[in-house]
């Protein structure tokens, strides 16, 4: 019966027999039953085990059990032993969060290297109920209350089964497994909910799990409908974000600005407080403010905020260019062409290229990011002007400022790259040797 239901779940999530499944096996009853079911379903699969080094010899015994059975079945087996306690302390996170991060990082690494299409984990109905209560306690909203999801990429075929059903299957099929005594401890929030809330709740209401199964299914459906509506309402925000910005005029059209903006930015690592503060900065026109997410940075500008991948860091590295250089790739892709004056037919120039008097240059030239205090003599001007003021006059966004470089000859700025040429290096009637410098944009 259980095997039949698992095969049906596989079809529901489009798990095909030509796909490779990576099965996460801890050695406990849940994952050992999952392994048995996957094996009986004749899928192409491998087994992965994480030794978190949290229970000493018991952790090693778990690993030994999984390795022995995988060897007997001649199944591809992967394992990794990690110091979870040390990682948690260094990262400033809980043991549970550290273990989760280490586990899924290793799973992704294996999937990439060995071409696994799907990760199968042994989450069951009680796990789903516990996750619901944990998220209710944390205040995570509808998404969290929908509990654990099963997808083609993260397949959780046991979600519809209770722990009792899993144990019954293990006994009927003489499946070997190990008990994790740490599951009895109430030091962890999940275990506390399991023993102190759910256990007495089931005594009072024996049909609790069936009721919660229905509740969670309804919540998952509700969340899916809500997602469709939110995506429809915020499609303009999404289209702009894909281009690296969001216009304030687009945000103004929304009736629930914080709700939709959080929906947009949460996947990029921004929390509700940051989104609230971002909206306040927009309202007060606090240009120049920066918000840092997990892997993204937001720059508040005049008419829009810009968003770039990565956290911008100060870069004072200088890159040198000698006389014979024809192209450079780092930190910016530039092409250099040398001409005599009579050879050069000056076409219409874009802001991505400039021609300078080569005889006025002192090699090696240098390319670096512009810095506070930098000055140049813009083309057509007599005196010098701060680079920062030039960029303000040009209305260059904060995000683009972070990516702006200067080309120098000795300590003199030749070109504020992509923006302004210095008057001291311009081509005149007396110029005989020319250098054309062009920005090459990657396709």
Image: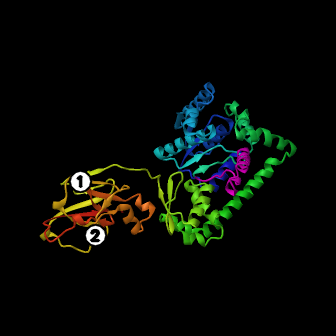
Q: Main secondary structure of the magenta part?
A: helix
Q: Position of residue 173 (x, y in %)?
A: 70, 36
- Image: magenta residue range: 125-152
Examine the image and state in which quarter residue 365 appears: bottom left
Q: CA gap, disc 1 to disc 2?
A: 21 Å
**Residue that mark 2 sits on:** 381
| Residue 119 visible, this angle | yes
Q: Is residue 400 above or below residue 30?
A: below
Q: Is residue 234 above or below residue 406?
A: below
Residue 2 is marked as none
Give yes or no for residue 61 being in the magenta stretch: no
Q: Quick one: which residue is furthest to the right in this view?
A: 204
Label 1 SS: loop
**Residue that mark 1 sits on:** 410
Give yes or no for residue 130 being in the magenta stretch: yes
Judged left or right of residue 441, residue 69 is right
**How many neighbours does mark 2 have within 10 angstroms: few (below 14), some (14-19), or many (20 or more)?**
few
Q: How many marks?
A: 2
- Residue lying at 53% horizontally and 35% vertically, measured from the top left: 79
**How many neighbours does mark 1 have within 10 angstroms: few (below 14), some (14-19), or many (20 or more)?**
few
Q: Quick one: which residue is furthest to the bottom in this view?
A: 348
Marks 1/2 in contact by CB < 8 Å: the verdict is no
| Residue 13 visible, this angle | no
Viewer-proximal residue, 92 or 84?
92
């Amino acid at each position: 019966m259980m095997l039949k239901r698992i095969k049906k779940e596989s079809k529901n999530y489009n798990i095909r027999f030509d796909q490779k499944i990576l099965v996460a096996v801890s050695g406990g009853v849940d994952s050992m039953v999952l392994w048995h079911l996957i094996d009986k379903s004749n899928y192409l699969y491998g087994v992965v085990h994480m030794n978190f080094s949290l229970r000493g010899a018991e952790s090693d015994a778990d690993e030994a059990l999984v390795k022995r059975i995988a060897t007997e079945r001649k199944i591809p087996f992967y394992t990794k032993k990690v110091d979870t306690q040390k990682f948690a302390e260094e990262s400033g996170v809980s043991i549970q969060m550290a273990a989760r991060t280490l586990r899924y990082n290793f799973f992704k690494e294996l999937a990439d290297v060995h071409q696994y299409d799907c990760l199968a984990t042994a989450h069951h109905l009680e796990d789903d109920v516990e996750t619901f209560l944990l998220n209710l306690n944390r205040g995570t909203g509808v998404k969290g209350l929908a509990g654990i999801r099963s997808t083609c990429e993260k397949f959780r075929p046991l979600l519809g089964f209770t722990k009792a059903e899993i144990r019954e299957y293990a006994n009927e099929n003489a499946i070997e497994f190990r008990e994790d005594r740490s599951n009895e401890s109430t030091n962890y929030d999940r275990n506390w909910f399991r023993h102190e809330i759910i256990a007495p709740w089931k005594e009072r209401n024996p049909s609790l799990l069936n009721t919660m199964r229905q509740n969670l299914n309804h919540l998952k459906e509700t969340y899916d409908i809500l997602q469709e509506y939110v995506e429809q309402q915020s499609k303009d925000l999404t289209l702009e974000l894909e281009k690296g910005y969001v216009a304030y005029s687009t945000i103004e059209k929304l009736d629930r600005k914080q709700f939709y903006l959080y929906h947009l930015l949460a996947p990029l690592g921004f929390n509700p407080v940051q989104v609230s503060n971002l909206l306040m900065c927009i309202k007060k026109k606090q240009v120049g403010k920066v918000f840092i997410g997990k892997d993204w940075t937001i720059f508040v500008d005049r008419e829009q905020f810009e968003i770039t991948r990565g956290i911008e860091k100060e870069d004072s590295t200088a890159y040198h260019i000698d006389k014979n250089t024809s192209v450079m790739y780092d930190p910016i892709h530039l092409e250099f062409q040398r001409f005599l004056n009579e050879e050069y037919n000056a076409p219409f120039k874009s802001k991505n290229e400039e021609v300078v008097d080569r005889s006025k240059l002192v090699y090696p030239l240098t390319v670096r990011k512009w810095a506070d205090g930098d000055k140049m003599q813009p083309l057509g001007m007599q005196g010098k002007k701060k680079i920062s003021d030039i960029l303000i006059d040009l209305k260059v966004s904060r995000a683009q400022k972070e990516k702006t470089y200067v080309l120098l000859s000795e300590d003199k700025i030749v070109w504020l790259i992509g923006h302004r040429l210095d008057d001291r290096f311009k081509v005149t009637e007396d110029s005989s040797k020319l250098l054309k410098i062009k920005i090459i944009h990657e396709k």
